[in-house]
Image (cartoon, rainbow, N blue to C red):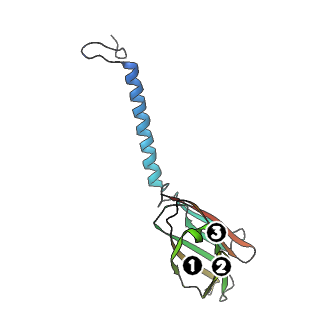
């Protein structure tokens, strides 16, 4: 008798069924391994896959943001703008991100902030090299995609999307 044949003695067995069970078990182990590797890489938040950067076509505006996050957690955005040294510039923030998320911190404090329709207009001071960096901390209970728009002037705009897991 060969090992791949079903036996009746001492215990009744069905080898074709046993092979299907073993195959299913191996597939399950591979799926679990894949989930662990995706989690370590940041596919579910906080990792290389979840971090993203969006840059305007002219390179004057850059947004570093989390591509993936969880509802209810705080997330940090960094907006870097290149302008004229020593002169303030106006940054317009909009999109569903501002409507569905609350801004918990805004550093450094803008020189002025105004409501501009459904957007927020911030006046930022620039350093001696003409760079202004704004750090935002946001929190949202929303689940799904949130879109953000950052704009300086008519030609420099960046669109970005954050997906929030439950």
Residue 50 picture location, percent across and down: 52, 59
Comparing labels 3 and 2, the label whose residue is closer to the camera: 3
* Residue 122 on image: x %, y %: 63, 82
Of badges 1 and 3, the one in the foreground is: 3
> Which residue is located at x 73 percent, y 78 percent?
153
Dot 3 crowding, Cα within 10 Å, few <14, some 14–19, many 20+? some
Relative to 23, 52 lies left or right: right
Please provide percent x and percent y for residue 60.
68, 74
Residue where numbered disc 3 is placed: 95
Tell me the residue at 75%/73% (across/down): 155
Q: Give the residue number, with chain letter if any, for mark 2.
A: 91
- Where disc 3 sits, the SS reads loop
| Cα–Cα span, label 3 and label 2 | 13 Å
Quadrant in which the N terminus appears = top left
Question: Label 1 vs label 2: CA separation?
Answer: 10 Å
Dividing the picture into quadrants, the one containing residue 149 is bottom right
Residue 79 in the image, given as x and y percentages of width and height: 59, 74
Q: Secondary structure at mark 2?
A: strand
Q: Is residue 103 above or below residue 39?
A: below
User: Secondary structure under badge 1?
Assistant: strand
**Marks 3 and 2: CB-CB under 8 Å?**
no
Q: On the picture, is 34 further left or further right than 101? A: left
Q: Residue furthest right?
A: 154
Q: Relative to 89, is 28 on the left or the right?
A: left
* Residues under numbered marks 1 and 2 in contact, where contact means CB atoms less than 8 Å apart: yes
Image quadrant assignment for residue 93 = bottom right
Q: Spatial distance from mark 1 to mark 3, Cα to Cα?
A: 17 Å
The residue sitting at the top extreme is 1
Residue that numbered label 1 is attached to: 134
Q: Nearer the viewer, mark 1 or mark 2?
A: 2
């Amino acid at each position: 008798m060969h090992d791949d044949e079903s036996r009746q003695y001492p215990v009744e067995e069905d080898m074709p069924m046993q092979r299907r069970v073993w195959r299913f078990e191996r597939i399950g182990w591979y799926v679990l391994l894949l989930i662990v590797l995706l989690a370590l890489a940041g596919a579910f938040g906080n990792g290389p896959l979840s971090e993203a950067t969006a840059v305007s076509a002219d390179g004057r505006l850059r947004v570093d943001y989390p591509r993936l996050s969880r509802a209810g957690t705080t997330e940090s955005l960094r907006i870097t703008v290149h302008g004229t040294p020593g002169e303030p510039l106006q940054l317009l923030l909009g999109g569903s991100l501002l409507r569905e998320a609350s801004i918990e911190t805004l550093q450094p404090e803008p020189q002025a902030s105004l409501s501009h329709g459904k957007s927020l207009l911030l006046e930022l001071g620039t350093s001696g090299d003409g760079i202004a960096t704004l750090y935002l901390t946001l929190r949202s209970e929303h689940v799904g995609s949130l879109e953000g728009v950052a704009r300086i002037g008519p030609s420099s705009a960046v669109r970005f999307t954050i997906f929030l897991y439950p």
